Amino acid sequence: HSGLPSAAMAQAMLAAAAAANPQRSLEAAAAAQQHLQQLEQQQLEQHRQHLEQRQLEQRQQLEQQAHLEHRQKLEHQRLVDQELAALQAAQATQAAQAALAGAQSGQPGSYSRGQMEAAMAYMAQQRQQQQLFHQHLAATQLLAQHEQAAAIAAAAALGYPGAGAGAQQAQAQARQAAARAAALQQEQLQQRQQQIEEQKRLQQQKLQEQQRQVQQRQQQQAASGKQGKVDCPQTGWQYIDPKGKVQGPFSLIEMQLWHAMGFFQPELRMRWDANDPFVELNKLFPPPLKPFESHPRRVPAANGNGAGGR
């Protein structure tokens, strides 16, 4: 206490001074009173510092608890989003495979409009999943950096004895957390790459198998020598859009997809041979012909112009 006497010692000094020298009793009393005031001020200052230290520790505990709850919410939301994306991707994959199989088999009626939409949205879904994955990696990295900065700041703010050791411990924990986050990111990246490679391999096998089946059907049809049935043209399809521009040429599969999705109105003019005029869809395939399944009806040009209708 910087050499200051205690309260009992100050009282004893005052009594001894009064007994030994009555003339100096007033001076001794004043000195003792001054010592007592200094002692009280020092005790009040120590009490104030202790209260400030307690308040700082309580505030840091509340901040750490709030940060932990926020992190748990983020992790829970990430898991929910990941499960939802996986479910949607699985549904889109099944629908796309069914649509692709129906299109390659030449049987447009074997798949629904929803399946056709899923087939066209499948690649967009894959790109979106890749973007979400990279965003998750970036968010995890930022979260680790935030944890490290919060731990270092909390340790540096401790001004009571032993704060140096607390800061070193907090810094060590922050480095360990950052190392774990980096290892987790690397592991997730490797797993995702393996999944992508496996999906590519399965899709390639599926495509090769479908191509083999198509070739077998073509060979069987050629060997059987069927007569009397003329298939719908496979290529050369063009149409005039609402703005009057010629679009194409497109393949039969593309036309089947768009027709199944309801993009073609009966009055839309189109053709499959560049030498023919553009004719309305309902005139190319009048009943009982089925659009893009039966062979289209040839309508002679009204003015002899093969690009008629522009």
Image: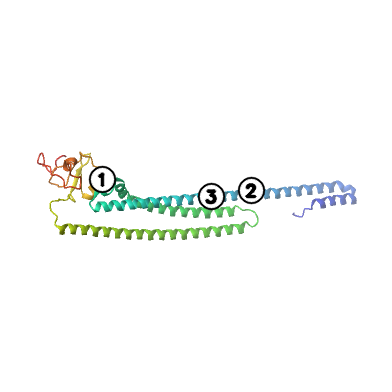
Q: Is the residue marked by circle 1 packed among few (<14), some (14-19), or many (20+) residues within 10 Å?
A: many
The disc, 2 or 3, on the residue closer to the chain's N-terminal end is 2
Label 1 SS: helix
Q: Which residue carries the number 3 mark? A: 69
Label 3 SS: helix
Horizontal relation, residue 209 to residue 271: left or right: right
Under mark 1, the amino acid is Ala
Horizontal relation, residue 302 to residue 123: left or right: left
Structural distance between the alpha carbons of marks 1 and 2: 70 Å
Q: Is residue 127 visible?
A: no
Disc 2 + disc 3, Cβ < 8 Å: no
Label 2 SS: helix
Under mark 3, the amino acid is Glu
Structural distance between the alpha carbons of marks 1 and 3: 50 Å
Viewer-proximal residue, 195 or 141?
Answer: 195
Horizontal relation, residue 281 to residue 197: left or right: left
Q: Could you say where residue 190 lies in the image, as x and y percent from the top left? A: 41, 61
Horizontal relation, residue 218 to residue 59: left or right: left
Viewer-proximal residue, 271 or 95?
Answer: 95
- Tell me where residue 210 sits by quadrant: bottom left
Structural distance between the alpha carbons of marks 2 and 3: 21 Å
Q: Residue at x 60, y 57 (%)?
A: 166
Under mark 2, the amino acid is Gln
The disc at residue 55 is 2
Task: Name the mark nearer the viewer: 1 or 2.
Answer: 1
The disc, 1 or 3, on the residue closer to the chain's N-terminal end is 3
Q: Which residue carries the number 1 mark? A: 260
The disc, 1 or 2, on the residue closer to the chain's N-terminal end is 2
Q: Could you say where residue 71 lies in the image, as x and y percent from the top left? A: 51, 51
Q: Could you say where residue 110 lies in the image, as x and y percent from the top left? A: 26, 49
Task: Name the mark nearer the viewer: 1 or 3.
Answer: 1
Q: Is the residue marked by circle 2 packed among few (<14), some (14-19), or many (20+) residues within 10 Å?
A: few
